[in-house]
Image (cartoon, helix red, strand yellow):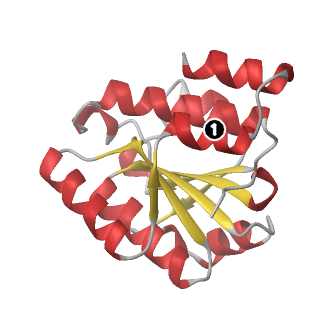
Amino acid sequence: MRIAKEDSLVLVVDVQEKLVPHMHDKEAAVSKMVTLVRGAKVLDIPVIAARQYPQGLGDIVMPLRLQLAEYHDKMTFSCCGDPLFMDAIRNKGKKNAIVIGVETHVCVLQTAIDLKAAGFTVIVAADAVASRFQRDYEIALKRMEQEGILLTTTESVLFELCRQAGGETFKTISNLVK
């Protein structure tokens, strides 16, 4: 299956101030998240972000926060556990959900599984998700594959969404992934 921009949205899960500092390889993961969100904006793909209990876990980290126009607060681990959040996702009218965020083995995993059960094709950019411990990250990716969730990378999905070389969109995407 090819991933088409007209069928896709990006979901950013819980990339928050009190969580991110504890993630393994956090700088690389957050950098990829920012790249993917910026690329989605260039491609006119909707981006929705979630914040888990922001009173305790803080806001979305900078510089990712600067890239986001729409976000929703939640108390459930899975974004799908919040009816208002699910309404926001469904109202976009897309069939593909590209998921990024933290923690891979908790909120990202549960969200991905629930989105798949809700009928979405779920794509997780493995270089744009993170957990505190590498082993949790690795096991979560294996579980996602077993659940039928597609794994990719930021660069791969952005070029797939871009479709062709040439033009300003391609140049912008190329510069983002460098």
| Residue 90 on image: x %, y % | 73, 73
Local secondary structure at mark 1: helix
Looking at the image, can residue 107 be seen?
yes
**The N terminus appears in which quarter of the rendering?**
bottom right
- The residue drawn where x is 34% and y is 24% is 27
Question: Front-most of 99 and 177?
Answer: 177
* Residue lying at 76% horizontally and 25% vertically, measured from the top left: 170
Near mark 1 (Cα within 10 A), the count class, few <14, some 14-19 or many ≥20, is many
Give the residue displayed 33% in from the left and 37% down from the top: 20
Quadrant housing residue 83: bottom right
Give coordinates of residue 163: x percent, y percent.
Answer: 75, 41
**Would you say 117 lies left or right of 26 here?**
right
Above or below residue 115? Residue 118 is below
Q: From where the camera sits, is residue 133 visible? A: no
Write down the residue under mark 1: 158
Counting from the top left corner in percent of width and height, residue 107 is at: 38, 62
Closer to the camera in the image, 65 or 162:
162
- Residue type at numbered disc 1: Leu
Residue 43 image offset from top left, x and y in percent: 78, 38
- Residue 67 is left or right of residue 80, and the answer is right
Q: Quadrant of the C terminus?
A: top right
Compared to 88, does 16 lie above or below? above
State the image quarter where residue 58 is shown.
top left
